[in-house]
Each structure stands twice: as C-alpha cells, then as structure tokens.
Image (cartoon, rainbow, N blue to C red):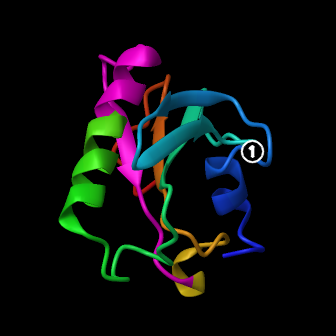
Amino acid sequence: MPDCIFCKIANHEIPSTIVYEDDKVIAFDDLNPQAPVHTLVVPKAHYENIIDGVPGDVLEAMAHAVGEVARAKGLEAGFRVITNTGAAAGQTVMHLHWHVLGGRDLGEGLV
C-alpha cells in the first residue's frame, strides 16, 4: 500500500526504533506510548487487520516477535498484547499490528 505508514516503516522508508525484525515482521517502538514499554509488531506484507486472510505463518512470526520483544524489553513480570480491528475498535492505522505494552503494573482493566 503506497500510503501506508507501517508499510513504509517495514520497508525502511521511514526511520523508527526497531526492536526486532525478520523476513516476515518488524517490531518498533510506538511514537505515542501508552505505557513505559509500547512496541508494535507489524507484518511486512500489508493486511488491513486480523480478519484479512492473514496466513498462519505470518501470525506465527508475529507471535514469535512478541516473545522477542518481551525478552528485549525485560517484560518478564508481565505484559499485554492488544490488536484493534476496525475504526470502531480504535484502529487508526489500517495495517494489522499488535501492541506490546508493559513496564508497569497494567492491572485487571481492559486496557
């Protein structure tokens, strides 16, 4: 997608603080963090959201990246993984991404 900011980050057209990268996904720190650790895990191929026919190997790579981010960021005490699907759920960039949040006690609330 030519105008997708996450595609541009995945293609290294826009600089970002990369936490993890492999051939299928990239993980980078969010520019507007909602917790002390807020890293986004994004597939390099463009999928609008989690119900956009994402192949299993891409989802597996994303799950692996979450573990790599958690280890790199020292989130052994716990962390949260969130994905928003559609504007009504708060998705603002229409490219599948998982938020990895941690670095403080997140409590039992929804977010």
The magenta stretch spans residue 21: no
Q: What secondary structure is found at the residue carrying circle 1?
A: loop
| Magenta extent | 67-86
Tally of numbered discs: 1
Res. 53 in view: yes
In which image quadrant can residue 71 be found? top left
Which residue is depicted at the point 52% across and 70% down? 46
Image location of residue 34, percent across then percent down: 64, 42
The magenta stretch spans residue 80: yes
In which image quadrant can residue 28 be found? top right
Please identify the quadrant where the N terminus is shown. Answer: bottom right
Question: Is residue 25 shown above or below 93?
Answer: above
Question: Is residue 48 shown above or below 80?
Answer: below
Residue to which mark 1 is pinned? 32
Which residue is depicted at the point 31% across and 81% down? 53
Res. 39 in view: no
Front residue of 100 and 97: 97
